[in-house]
Image: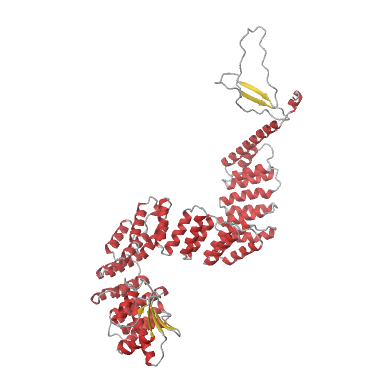
Amino acid sequence: MASPSSLLSWPHLPISLSFQPKNPSSSASSLATARVSVQDPPPQEPLPPSDAKPSPKKSSNTSYLWVNPNSLRAAGLARARAGSSRRARLAAAVAALSACQPEEALVTAALEAAFLDPPSEQDAVIVLNTAAAKPATSVLALRWFLRNAEVRKEVILYNVVLKALRKRRRWGDTEALWDEMLREGVRPDNATFSTVISCARACALPNKAVEWFQKMTDFGCSPDMLTYSVVIDAYGRAGDAEMALRLYDRARGEELPLDSVICATVIKVHSNSGNFDGALNVFEEMKATGVKPNLVVYNTVLDAMGRAMRPWVVKTIHGELVSQKMLPNRATYSCLLQAYTRARYGEDAMAVYRIMKDEVMDIDVVLYNMLMSMCADIGYVDEAEEIFRDMKASIAARSKPDSWSYSSMVTLYSGTGNVLGAEGILNEMVDAGFKPNIFILTSLIRCYGKAGRTDDVVRSFTMLEDLGIVPDDRFCGCLLTVAAGTPAEELDKVIDCIGKSNAQLGSVVKLLVDRTAPGEHLREAAGGLLGSVRGVVKIPYCNCLMDLAVNLNQMEKACALLDVALQLGIYTNVQTRTKTQWSLHLRGLSVGAALTTLHVWTSDLYRAVQAGEELPPLLGIHTGQGKNTYSSDRGLAAVFESHLKELDAPFHEAPDKAGWFMTTSVAAMHWLDTRKSAELVAV
């Protein structure tokens, strides 16, 4: 046992703790509290006065244990007490800083009250890192610590405050602190640059991030992989994809280890620049080098492949994600939904949508509208109605239908000829406070045109004028489509609407309808029109004009329109010739345009035979499969099959080539020789 002198020399204050004695001497209901001390000896019971009467022994609920100050347990108890005191002091400093206004006098008073002795560097780091809610206060506290704390590396404290400013996205304060740091002669390190660069990116200032990255070598700093990742992303956001990828190659050349962060960044840069093969290559490369993709990487590459319109790749990557036991999140399903709706993968898109519904995930109006647009394009009536009901029943305002949602429903019903459905949605839209836009009126006019309700077409056009909406090229194209299917006795009503929408187009239509108008006048007017309109509507205009000409039995004018379109390069590669086969390519043409092209082609074949030219062994007509935008409900292949039978042409559907009608040169020559009517002679 140590001597009393050793007890007196122990420098620490008493340390107390409570414990439960294993063998209580009193009743089980009362437990003694022990006092453990490494300084004071156990207190002695005072002796009773000599004249006191004998009394029962006084019991105390506190007992005392003395601990040898030279033992390991005493040192541990002393450290625990010292740590507790330090934590309390730091907590008080943080609380005081958080409570005071960002004024130098108040900050100084708060810290001086908390630190009676000079704080350590670690104390300063803890306080600055914890009291980061007010950036201005953090900067004032930084200055106080730099003056009063025992700091070995001042740059560490600057980095802590820079991170606080980054968290609050205070770029102006970050630049000011950087300037102050240099004025004080503090040299920045890699962490400083990494923090400042990432702050610039967080503040949506990619050019600033690039600027600070370029300063690193001036201070003898070399970027690490995290800094490379931030700067690569900054270059990508600044639109300099080439420099971003050059940095990626530089990082690989320095043999820095790839990680999921930089790979996700490079994939995103490739995707934003349209290099989807590059994005996929980085994804495969990272796996080949042993870097395991995380969910962020998977989501990034799924988004890239969705933009690339590669839904089959999306399905493969999603399957890989699931096989890795990763749990898809909302971002994952959003990428899948966007990929499948863009590619019109109806079943896959609806499956993802129902998963999101079952998981009660947030679906905003943008995703809803992508689904609605897909359903309108591929004729998913029941699915679109389900989605529209879900939108209207949604509690969240950001999921409610907007004008685009109503537009998709009108387009859907118009495409299926459901006039009542289209009118009902239009009325519902107006009741919801939305005004019909040009897309809705375009779809409505198409619907009335299919139903043969010419007067309603005119009424809808009047609505367009009343709303002050200026007709665009697509709207005029819709009127042209309606005109092509309108009976001759009502055609003037639609032509009047076309003329009001586009005077130049109206003039061409009038020349086309007027049987007395010379073909050369039509050719000249059509050339001026088709040479001036936007490229996206050139083919639709040509198709509709030829449809109208064929429906009016004006094949001569239809051929003139086709010749103008070929000269302007609107139709390309319609006829191809090889040594073994001559082909006519009609895929993408309307029925009228296809029949006109067939008429011209058979005339060319007849001329070749008359000139003694030898035909190749095979001749083929390619119509494609199914329906397209311009073909009838039966599809171009079905229409052509009937038409070829009417002509008694020897072309038959090829069993091994879908969408092709083939014949031999012998059969074709026999057919051409037996037909010497004027319709096979070039006009």
The x, y position of residue 37, in whole percent, is 68, 26
The x, y position of residue 432, in whole percent, is 33, 56
**Residue 683 seen:** no
The quadrant where residue 620 appears: bottom left
Q: Residue furthest left?
A: 489
Q: Is residue 138 above or below residue 539?
A: above
The x, y position of residue 568, in whole percent, is 42, 81
Q: Is residue 480 above or below residue 114?
A: below
Residue at 59% over, 39% down: 96
Nearest the camera: 449 or 677? 677
**Residue 359 seen:** yes
Quadrant showing the C terminus: bottom left
Q: Is residue 593 above or below residue 4?
A: below
Left or right, residue 576 beside residue 75 = left
Nearest the camera: 266 or 258? 258
Q: Is residue 144 above or below residue 497?
A: above
Nearest the camera: 432 or 535? 535
Residue at 48% over, 56% down: 332
Left or right, residue 578 beside residue 85 = left
